[in-house]
């Protein structure tokens, strides 16, 4: 769809904006990336997403779409080359189920962990590992990517864990992506994150680590006062 | 088509099951409805939804699909040759429908639950004390502010839908569909909320109530929602059991 204006409002440290970028890049869609300062949200963001005031927001020919998984499905349906979701309805439902599972179960635990005291964090980390083990059980050993030989919806919806989990392990001193108990998960994330178009979007890991470490240190300082 | 090809693991009071029943009825799909005892879940449920162990589960050709909004989308796609379509064909409108169904999922159940719990515990506390003692009075007054806050939050969220509706017949325009299906089961809770909360939802959000009533004119909806009085009794009983 030549001549389309596509804009992505994002934040460099957001896994949700990242997965939308992955979808756009896999489809070969040209877009303008707009970096948001989340401590000082732009009038444009507040106008396009008045309800949640969050990134990412995709703006296509002036019309906004919010919620990263909704955006990814929109991208898949608008640019029909290189499909992201499977064709079969049951497989589509299964992909949507697991993507929702991760967003509903793992994300709140990550947030909780980042604001837990030292005493609480081990318990929360254990819950997070259980969620990952359940995700592991959905993987098929014979496929490099979730759906087979080609990267798809589930891969881009979930692979951010392969970046954020190791980072949190360093900052909070907990174990999440246990290689021994989650071998398929570890291999899957490694394989996805090695794909060139995925790799070139990933923010600098040292910058990401510093950003989240700063947030965590500031939180811990308030707790000890 | 053999009815047992499509099986729904159900619970009569579950809002999420109602969504699925509405979608199946809209598409005219025959199915076998199996009522679950949530206090003693069947082997079939535990096998078909091992991750969450929850209803609804749709079983089609022996394969399970879970999560109500995902099931509704599946129904639309698996029976795409059956009229009416539940999602718009335009990708932008489809994204809007998904956004609003996601909004309902995120916010309304939590608020409804808090709302009911807060109010119902209060009601029971006051009812149980034949003499209004200091304890009950204290509970009432300290909870009073919380209750009002919960009420305000609930109305605030309904007002978002009120605004989104505008002059439209349904959430996405002239056609009933996915986003309406996500919300309409909550209508059978309105009686309980109004009774316990001593409020009129219609007065606060007239367009939302008009929309709900319009949806209820569809047979797929009216046949899938239980009697609001039955729902109120069920909720009260559930909370009674929790507090005894």
Image (cartoon, coloured by chain):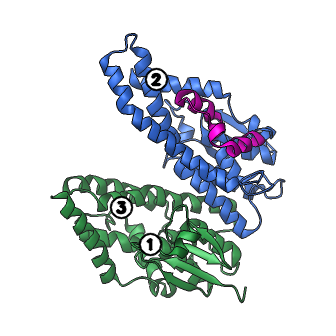
Q: In the figure, is residue A105 to the left or right of A127?
A: right
Residue A15: which numbered mark, if any? 1
Residue bearing mark 2: B123
Q: In the figure, is residue A171 to the left or right of A47?
A: left
- Residue A225: x and y in percent read 15, 58
Quarter of the rendering containing residue B240:
top left
The residue segment tinted magenta is B186-215
Q: Is residue A208 above or below residue A98?
A: below
Cα–Cα gap, marks 2 and 1: 44 Å
Give the color of chain A as drawn. Answer: green
Residue B211 lies in the magenta-colored region: yes
Of B144 and B85, which appears nearest the observer?
A: B144
Q: Using the image, name the chain to which the residue with label 2 belongs.
A: B
Of A154 and B46, which appears nearest the observer?
A: A154
Which chain corresponds to the colour blue? B
Q: Using the image, name the chain to which the residue with label 1 belongs.
A: A
């Amino acid at each position: 769809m030549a001549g389309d204006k596509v804009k992505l409002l994002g934040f460099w440290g957001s896994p949700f904006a990242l997965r939308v970028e992955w979808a756009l890049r896999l489809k070969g869609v040209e877009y303008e990336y707009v970096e948001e300062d989340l401590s000082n949200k732009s009038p444009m963001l507040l106008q396009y997403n008045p309800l949640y005031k969050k990134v990412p927001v995709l703006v296509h020919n002036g019309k906004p779409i919010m919620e990263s998984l909704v955006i990814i499905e929109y991208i898949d349906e608008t640019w029909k080359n290189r499909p992201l979701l499977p064709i079969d309805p049951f497989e589509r439902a299964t992909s949507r189920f697991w993507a929702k599972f991760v967003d509903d179960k793992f994300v709140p635990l990550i947030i909780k962990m980042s604001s837990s005291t030292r005493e609480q964090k081990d318990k929360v980390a254990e819950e997070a590992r259980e969620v990952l083990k359940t995700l592991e059980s959905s993987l098929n050993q014979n496929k490099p990517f979730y759906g087979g030989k080609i990267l798809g919806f589930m891969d881009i919806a979930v692979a951010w864990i392969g970046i954020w989990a190791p980072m949190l392990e360093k900052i909070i001193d907990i174990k999440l992506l246990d290689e021994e108990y989650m071998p398929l998960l570890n291999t899957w994330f490694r394989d996805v994150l090695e794909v060139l178009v995925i790799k070139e979007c990933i923010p600098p890991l040292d910058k990401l680590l510093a950003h989240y470490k700063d947030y965590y240190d500031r939180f811990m300082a308030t707790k000890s006062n | 088509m053999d009815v047992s090809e499509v099986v729904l693991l159900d619970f009569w009071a579950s809002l999420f099951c109602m969504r699925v029943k509405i979608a199946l009825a809209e598409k005219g799909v025959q199915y076998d409805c199996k009522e679950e005892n949530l206090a003693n879940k069947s082997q079939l449920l535990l096998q078909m939804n091992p991750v969450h162990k929850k209803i609804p589960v749709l079983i089609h050709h022996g394969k399970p699909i879970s999560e109500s909004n995902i099931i509704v989308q599946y129904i639309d796609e698996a029976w795409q040759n059956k009229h009416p379509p539940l999602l718009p064909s335009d990708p932008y409108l489809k994204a809007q429908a998904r956004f609003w169904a996601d909004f309902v999922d995120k916010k309304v159940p939590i608020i409804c639950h808090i709302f009911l719990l807060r109010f119902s515990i209060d009601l029971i506390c006051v009812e149980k004390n034949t003499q209004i003692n200091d304890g009950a009075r204290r509970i009432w007054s300290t909870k009073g502010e919380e209750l009002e806050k919960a009420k305000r939050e609930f109305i605030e969220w309904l007002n978002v839908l009120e605004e989104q509706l505008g002059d439209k017949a349904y959430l996405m325009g002239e056609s009933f569909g996915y986003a309406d299906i996500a919300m309409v089961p909550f209508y059978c809770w309105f009686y309980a909320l109004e009774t316990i909360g001593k409020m009129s939802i219609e007065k606060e959000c007239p367009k939302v109530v008009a929309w709900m009533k319009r949806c209820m004119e569809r047979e797929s909806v009216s046949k899938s929602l239980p009697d609001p009085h039955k729902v109120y009794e069920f909720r009260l009983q559930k909370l009674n059991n929790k507090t005894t």
